[in-house]
Structure formats: structure tokens, C-alpha cells
Amino acid sequence: MSAREKAAKAGHRTLITLFSLFAAFPFAWMLITTFKKTNDLLNPNSFPFGYPKGPTLENLRVLFEETLFVRWIGNTLFVGVIVVIITLLLAVPAGYALARLSAPSASSSASASSSPTWCRPPSSSSRSRRW
């Protein structure tokens, strides 16, 4: 491996590491603030990554006992499951119908690559030509 390839590999890994840390930071911040006391969260002089007054489970108690969080999670799961069922009920028959349709160029690779082209309605390409 040449020096240039090693430098490119190190730069690539550094970039991936920086992007990963950037993406993971909000989750780490949520985890840290979950166990902080309310006064520590509101105090601008408090160290943001530590627990000056010790960690607490008070925020989790409030979340589960004083809000409707469990119901909200249940509603979210219910809506998600219903959306998946509706999507499957509509997409599976449509996919089957498109798979059974024969393309103008009937070779397997050509029909797979040109299917977005020949499935488009003819009016969509003529819209851009209007004055």
C-alpha cells in the first residue's frame, strides 16, 4: 500500500468517525440529561456532561407516572402497524401486477432497468414542453 493510499484510508476513517460522533451526539445528550436533576439542567453554570448533584431517576418517574407516555407509545405503535398493513395490502398486488406485465423489450435485464421509463404516463414527459 502506498503512502497516498494509507493517507486516503486514514482520512476516510477520520471522516466516518467524525460523522458517526456527530450523529450519535444527540442520543448521548438525551441519555445524559435523562439522569440529571432539573436544577442541574436549568443552571447555566452546571457542567453539561456530568452529574454535580448525582444521577437521579426522577425524570423517568415523572415521565411514566405523571404523563400519558405509555399511551402515546401505544398509539404510535398502533398507527405504525396499521400503516404497514395498508402499505402491504396495496403494494403487494401492485407489485405482482407489474411483475406479470411484459415490457416492450422483454429481456430480463432490459425490463428491470427500463421499467420506470415505460411505466410513466406519456403526459408527464410532455408537460415540460408546454409554453
Image (cartoon, rainbow, N blue to C red):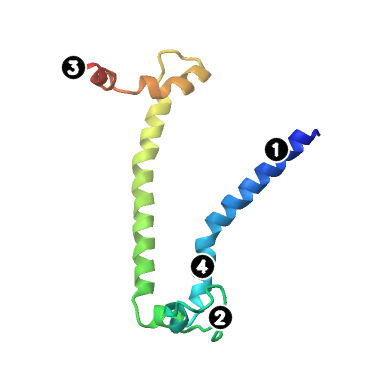
Kindly report the distance in space between the C-alpha atoms of the residues bearing marks 2 and 3.
66 Å
Residue, disc 3: 131
Real-space Cα separation, disc 1 to disc 4, in angstroms: 31 Å
Q: Secondary structure at mark 3?
A: loop
> Looking at the image, is mark 2 or mark 3 earlier in the sequence?
2
In this rendering, the answer to whether 44 lies above or below 2 is below
What element does badge 2 sit on?
A: loop
> Relative to 109, does residue 92 appear above or below in the rendering?
below
Q: How many marks?
A: 4
| Residue type pointed to by label 4 | Trp
Q: Are marks 3 and 4 in contact (CB under 8 Å)?
A: no
Asked if the residue under mark 4 is in contact with the one under mark 2, i.e. CB atoms within 8 Å, the reply is no
N-term-proximal mark, 3 vs 4: 4
Label located before the other in sequence (1 or 4):
1
Residue at the bottom extreme of this rendering? 53
Gap between marks 2 and 1, in whole Å? 40 Å
Measure the C-alpha gap from mark 2 to mark 4: 13 Å
Q: Which residue is mark 2?
A: 51
- Judging by the rendered image, the residue that carries numbered circle 4 is 29
Q: Is residue 67 above or below residue 124?
A: below
C-alpha gap between disc 3 and disc 4: 53 Å
Residue indicated by mark 1 = 8
- Cβ atoms at labels 1 and 3 below 8 Å apart: no
Q: Position of residue 92 (x, y in %)?
A: 39, 38
Q: Position of residue 34 (x, y in %)?
A: 49, 75
Residue type at mark 2 is Tyr
Where disc 1 sits, the SS reads helix
Cβ atoms under marks 2 and 1 closer than 8 Å: no
**Disc 1 or disc 4, which is closer to the eye?**
1
